[in-house]
Image (spheres, rainbow, N blue to C red):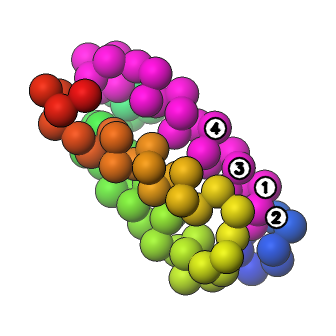
């Protein structure tokens, strides 16, 4: 996707942000259940999202949505009692 150029990367980043916001609307049990339906764990999803953020940042540090993506990922990493 990154190799497809900036327009495709911006669309991907916007989609990633929308997906992360869907996940943050779920409680922790709902997040685990959603991950299970995708055949993964929440921990694995978090690692993948962290990697996505790193790759997007490396590709274009001025890419729209990076800050918002980072905030959503941080919220998903927060311990259950930190919300």
Q: Residues within 10 Å of mark 4 (few under 14, many from 20)?
A: few
Q: Do the numbered discs 3 and 1 sit on residues whose CB atoms are within 8 Å?
A: yes
State the residue position of label 2.
Answer: 8
* Residue that lies at the very extreme toward the right in this rendered image: 7
Q: Do the numbered discs 4 and 3 sit on residues whose CB atoms are within 8 Å?
A: yes
State the residue position of label 3.
Answer: 14
Disc 2 versus disc 1: distance between alpha carbons? 5 Å
State the residue position of label 1.
Answer: 11
Marks counted in the figure total 4
Residue 42: give x, y in percent of width and height: 30, 38
> Where does the C terminus fall, quadrant-wise?
top left
Q: Residues within 10 Å of mark 2 (few under 14, many from 20)?
A: few
Residue at image point 39% right, 61% down: 50
Disc 2 versus disc 3: distance between alpha carbons? 10 Å
Considering only vertical position in the picture, is 48 above or below 63?
above
Considering only vertical position in the picture, is 33 above or below 47?
above
Q: Do the numbered discs 2 and 3 sit on residues whose CB atoms are within 8 Å?
A: no
Q: Is residue 37 visible?
A: no
Answer left or right for 17 relative to 7: left
* Earlier-in-chain disc, 4 versus 1: 1
Residue at image point 35% right, 25% down: 31
State the residue position of label 4.
Answer: 18
Q: Which stretch is magenta? A: 9-33
Q: Residues within 10 Å of mark 1 (few under 14, many from 20)?
A: some
> Where does the N terminus fall, quadrant-wise?
bottom right
Residue 66: give x, y in percent of width and height: 58, 62
Disc 3 versus disc 1: distance between alpha carbons? 5 Å
Disc 2 versus disc 4: distance between alpha carbons? 15 Å
Disc 4 versus disc 1: distance between alpha carbons? 11 Å
């Amino acid at each position: 996707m990154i190799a497809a150029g900036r327009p495709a990367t911006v669309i991907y980043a916007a989609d990633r942000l929308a997906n992360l916001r869907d996940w943050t609307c779920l409680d922790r049990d709902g997040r685990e259940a959603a991950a299970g339906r995708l055949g993964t764990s929440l921990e694995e999803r978090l690692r993948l999202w962290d990697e996505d953020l790193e790759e997007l940042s490396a590709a274009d540090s001025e890419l729209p949505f990076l800050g918002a993506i980072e905030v959503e990922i941080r919220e998903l990493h927060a311990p259950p009692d930190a919300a």
